[in-house]
Image (cartoon, rainbow, N blue to C red):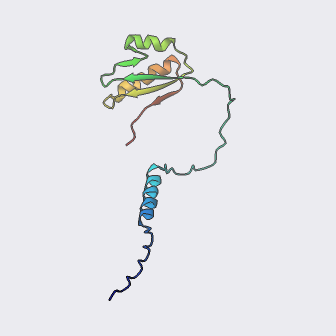
Amino acid sequence: MQFKRPARRQMAESVVPMINVVFLLLIFFMMSARIAPPPPFELNLPATPQDAPRAEEITLYISAAGEIGVQGRSDAQAWAQLATLDTGQSVAIRADAGLAAPVLAKTLAQLAGMGFASITLAVRAP
């Protein structure tokens, strides 16, 4: 006696892989998003002409011992080099974390005395 085999039912497509992909995308976008608090009030920033030249930034390096370096020069040569540069340029200070605060304050005073008005200090994000 031969019995007919029952017809195989088609297996339903599993949605688990799609759910995994959605969760991975969700995690990716949550990790790559930058969540910043809204500004306390609305600002109307000033505009500049499109063809206005942007001043280049001068990078000033300071070691933990207080030695400075700028554009390949160090110490006295670096101060002489800074004196020849345009004071309208911004100075970015990249100082060692072990630098004493009085040394940094003295350097800032010297830069201000030379006429540099825009000075920024580079820091490492926590």
Of residue 89 and residue 66, the one placed in the foreground of this image is 89
Q: Residue at position x 44%, y 73% from top?
A: 12
Q: Position of residue 42 (x, y in %)?
A: 64, 48
Q: Residue 63's quadrant in the figure?
A: top left
Q: Position of residue 74 (x, y in %)?
A: 37, 14
* The C terminus - image quarter: top left
Is 55 positioned to the left or the right of 5 in the image? right
Q: Position of residue 64 (x, y in %)?
A: 31, 25
Q: Residue 105's quadrant in the figure?
A: top left
Of residue 64 and residue 111, the one placed in the foreground of this image is 64
Q: Where is residue 93 in the image (x, y as percent from the top left)?
A: 43, 26
Is 44 positioned to the left or the right of 32 in the image? right
Is 53 positioned to the left or the right of 25 in the image? right
Of residue 74 and residue 98, the one placed in the foreground of this image is 74
* Number of marks in the rendered image: 0
Furthest toward the front, the residue is: 1
Please, is residue 35 above or below residue 11 in the view? above
Of residue 54 and residue 89, the one placed in the foreground of this image is 54
Please, is residue 35 above or below residue 45 in the view? below
Furthest toward the right, the residue is: 49
Q: Residue at position x 40%, y 10% from top?
A: 77
* The N terminus - image quarter: bottom left
Q: Residue at position x 52%, y 14% from top?
A: 85
Furthest toward the bottom, the residue is: 1
